[in-house]
Amino acid sequence: MLAGKNSLELLKSVETENLVVKLIEQLNKDFQLANINEEFKLNISVLELKNNLDSLLLYLITKKYDDYLNLLYRIDVSEKEMATINNNNLVGTIENITFLVLKREFQKVWFKNRT
């Protein structure tokens, strides 16, 4: 199910499974439920999705930390996995958080698609 060790590899798996639109819909739903007024276009490329999510998470971490925490809770990102992220490099940290967000959202979509 989850092939990939980073966001781009994961998103290639999502493309292979033809679940990109469902992944974006799930992201949009969870952002809305977390009261974050951002929405990703359904026809966005996977690279744009990753880059936009990176930028948005950076913004939330630096400017709206409570909203960021609420989003992670809403998405149900693993605290155990979050604790393994190395915080020495901000860019690398954001990329790792993006990967965990996308991975969790893909898990939700993949399981829904299989039932």
Image: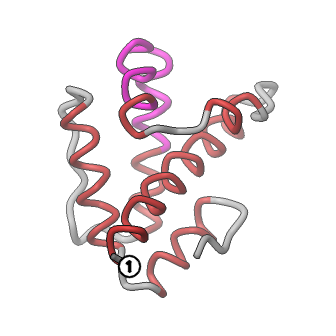
Could you say which quadrant of the image residue 21 lies in? Answer: bottom left
Does the magenta-highlighted stretch encompass residue 59? yes
Question: Looking at the image, which is closer to me, 113 or 95?
Answer: 113
The answer to which quarter of the image holds residue 56 is top left
* Badge 1 amino acid: Arg
**Residue at left offset 38%, top offset 79%:** 114
The residue under the point 21% across, 47% down is 29
Report the colour scheme. Answer: secondary structure
The C terminus: image quadrant: bottom left
**What residue occupies the far front of the structure in this picture?**
115
Give residue 1's position: percent from left, percent from top.
Answer: 58, 76
Neighbours of disc 1 within 10 Å: few (<14), some (14-19), many (20+): few
Residue at 49 percent across and 16 percent down: it is: 62
Query: Residue sitting at 42 percent across and 71 percent down?
Result: 110
Lateral position of residue 92 relative to residue 115, left or right:
right
Q: Is residue 106 above or below residue 114?
A: above
Label 1: state its secondary structure: helix
Classify 65 as above or below 52.
Answer: above
Q: Nearer the viewer, residue 112 or 20?
A: 112
Within the image, what quadrant is residue 34 found in?
A: top left
Q: Verify whether residue 66 appears in magenta.
A: yes
Q: Which residue is mark 1?
A: 114
Q: What x and y, as percent, mark residue 66? A: 40, 12
Give the magenta range: 54-72
Q: Main secondary structure of the magenta part?
A: helix
Q: Position of residue 3 (x, y in %)?
A: 66, 74
